[in-house]
């Protein structure tokens, strides 16, 4: 991980559109910042339910992290809708957090947006981001996670069960390659980086990629 200090401001680009493989559930258009929803009443109520009896912000972060991480995993969220007799199937959807809360399974992106939205009830935007980038283990894959700034910068991993309850110091996360940061206020990118599948820069190979990140995000 490089960290938020290495980023520059980027456009809050639109995602979605009326395409068969659109990244939005109903072909609607959202901007990146609209996937972080601290003002949603359902999200606010869920945060209160999870944290109202907990004494510290660290306890509250871990409670929310455990809750989101306990959703069963799926590589992509598939949504089928029927609107005025027209059936649409979206094979890989970014849900809004209030929608994600009711989904039977979630992938890494939807978990990260959901977790940041919960924690934004108490933490300001300049301390909390959803991050899209690469995870380098025995190979390199696109991944999404969260970063929180407390006494130092930490990664929150809501997908990997083995680390779901930990605040992971930024300097201990060499396998995470951060590229795009965003919250409900802004979007930032680490210049000169390229995101792999499923957020790959290979637009010709990944048909729905254009719904996620424009080429300016994959330099």
Image (spheres, rainbow, N blue to C red):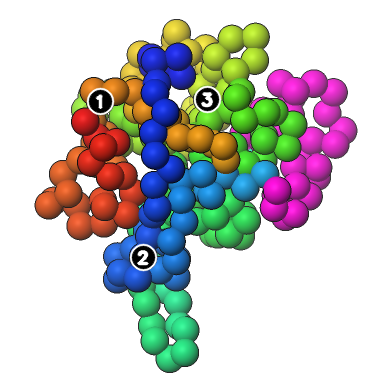
Report the residue at 80% width, 45% height from top. Answer: 49
Q: Which residue is mark 3?
A: 147
Instruction: Count up the numbered dots.
Output: 3
Q: Residues within 10 Å of mark 3 (few under 14, many from 20)?
A: many
First in sequence: mark 2 vs mark 1 = 2
Report the residue at 46% width, 51% height from top. Answer: 31
In this picture, which residue range is highlighted in magenta?
39-66
Q: Is residue 141 above or below residue 84?
A: above
Q: What percent of the width, then of the height, locates residue 149?
A: 60, 18
First in sequence: mark 3 vs mark 2 = 2
Q: Residues within 10 Å of mark 1 (few under 14, many from 20)?
A: some
For the C terminus, give its image quadrant: top left
Q: Which residue is mark 1?
A: 193
First in sequence: mark 3 vs mark 1 = 3
3 and 2 marks in contact (CB < 8 Å) = no
2 and 1 marks in contact (CB < 8 Å) = no
Q: Which residue is mark 2?
A: 17
How much space separates mark 2 and mark 1, taking CA atoms?
A: 26 Å
Is residue 55 magenta-colored?
yes
Q: Residues within 10 Å of mark 2 (few under 14, many from 20)?
A: some
Q: Quadrant of residue 151?
A: top right
- Judged by its main secondary structure, the magenta piece is helix
Residue at the right extreme, as displayed: 53
Report the residue at 71% width, 21% height from top. Answer: 58
Camera-side residue of 176 and 11: 11
How much space separates mark 3 and mark 2, taking CA atoms?
A: 29 Å
Camera-side residue of 7 and 54: 7
Can the viewer see residue 215 in this picture? yes
Q: What percent of the width, then of the height, locates residue 198?
A: 28, 44
Can the viewer see residue 111 in this picture? no
């Amino acid at each position: 991980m490089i960290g938020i200090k290495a980023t520059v401001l980027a456009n809050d680009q639109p995602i979605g559109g009326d395409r068969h493989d659109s990244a939005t559930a109903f072909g609607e258009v959202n901007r990146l910042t609209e996937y972080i929803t601290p003002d949603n009443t359902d999200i606010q109520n869920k945060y209160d339910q999870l944290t109202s009896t907990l004494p510290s912000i660290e306890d509250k972060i871990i409670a929310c992290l455990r809750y989101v991480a306990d959703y069963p995993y799926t590589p992509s969220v598939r949504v089928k809708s029927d609107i005025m007799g027209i059936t649409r199937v979206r094979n890989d959807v970014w849900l809004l957090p209030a929608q994600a809360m009711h989904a039977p399974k979630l992938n890494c992106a939807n978990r990260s947006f959901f977790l940041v939205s919960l924690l934004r009830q108490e933490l300001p935007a300049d301390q909390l981001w959803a991050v899209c980038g690469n995870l380098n283990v025995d190979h390199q894959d696109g991944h999404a996670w969260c970063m929180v700034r407390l006494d130092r910068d930490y990664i929150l991993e809501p997908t990997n069960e083995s680390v779901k309850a930990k605040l992971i110091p930024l300097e201990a996360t060499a396998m995470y390659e951060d590229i795009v940061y965003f919250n409900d206020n802004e979007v930032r990118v680490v210049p000169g980086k390229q995101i792999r599948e499923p957020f790959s820069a290979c637009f010709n190979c990944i048909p729905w990629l254009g719904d996620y990140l424009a080429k300016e995000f994959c330099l």
